[in-house]
Amino acid sequence: MMAPAKLLLVDDDETIRYTLGIILRKHGFEVTVASTVNEALKHIGSEVFDVLLSDLHMPGAGDGLTVVSAMRHANPKAVTILLSSFPHMDAAAQAILLQTDEILVKPMDVNMLVDAIKQRLAVGPTRTRLVESVATILERSTDSTISDWYELVEKEESLTAIPMTFQLRSGHLPQVFQDLVLRLRSSTILGTKELHSTSAAQHGTARRQQGYTAAMMVEESRILQVSVFNTLQKNLANIDFSVVLIGVMTIADEIDSQLGQAMKSYLAESIVDALPA
């Protein structure tokens, strides 16, 4: 007969530890319980487990992710499962899944919980996922993001009032994305004086000559931000979440900066147009 799977149950709720521990033992697991992150870390450092079942939200220093990270480091062959009380956390779940194998929502049927643990044991731990910076994701997704942007623009009647080819409409964007990637990889402090962009100035002049209004320029820029953030959403499972917030803020700052520079040249062109011949 195979030895029972060793399971570490981590939860600050005494009732859950007691009742769930009894149930899991009845289903053939060898269960060790821990009520705090520190207690769990001590067990992980001194014993070998097949399964970690931990509450995500723990009081005091650390949380379920701290325990998962420790288990992954000490025993990469162990299956790691988190319990959460929040049923709607798709985005957060993708981030957490960079470290843990599965998330289960509390409360859940005990039989379903046991089946989920056994199924995950049969599959084994998830392979390490590719983690990328925001800059890398935008760099490799430039073409698809521009295509998504163009589709959204083509649905906006205020913009399609001026018909254009794909090239005329989006020709400025490859340089915009190069500037975004450069800005994300630089050490420029958020909110510092904008770096001069020749392409942004040229874009403003071109849009004036093509008949755009100022409102159309702003709407076009808004759609660009939406498209970029949609791309990040699609790649959420790969994002390095330690820098994602500053990355998002930098993107918004850079796109706004480029719009501001484009508007300056747009207005300058408008003044030239207004001069007597």
Image: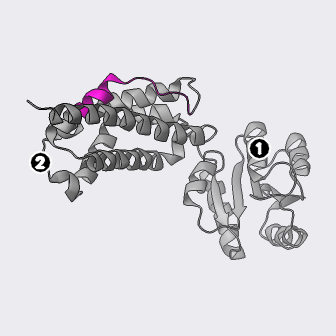
Q: Amino acid at mark 1?
A: Met
Q: Is residue 18 above or below residue 244?
A: below
Q: Is there any visible trace of residue 167 in the rendered image? A: no
Q: Residue at x 51, y 27 (%)?
A: 193
Q: Which residues are magenta?
A: 191-205
Taking the image as shown, residue 146 lies to the left or right of residue 110, namely left
Q: Position of residue 234 (x, y in %)?
A: 44, 49
Taking the image as shown, residue 267 lies to the left or right of residue 194, namely left
Taking the image as shown, residue 206 lies to the left or right of residue 21, namely left
Q: Position of residue 34 (x, y in %)?
A: 89, 57
Q: Is residue 181 magenta?
A: no
Q: Which residue is mark 2?
A: 163
Q: Nearer the viewer, residue 81 or 132?
A: 132
The mark closer to the camera, 1 or 2, is: 2
Taking the image as shown, residue 53 lies to the left or right of residue 209, namely right
Q: Amino acid at mark 2?
A: Pro
Q: Which residue is mark 1?
A: 71
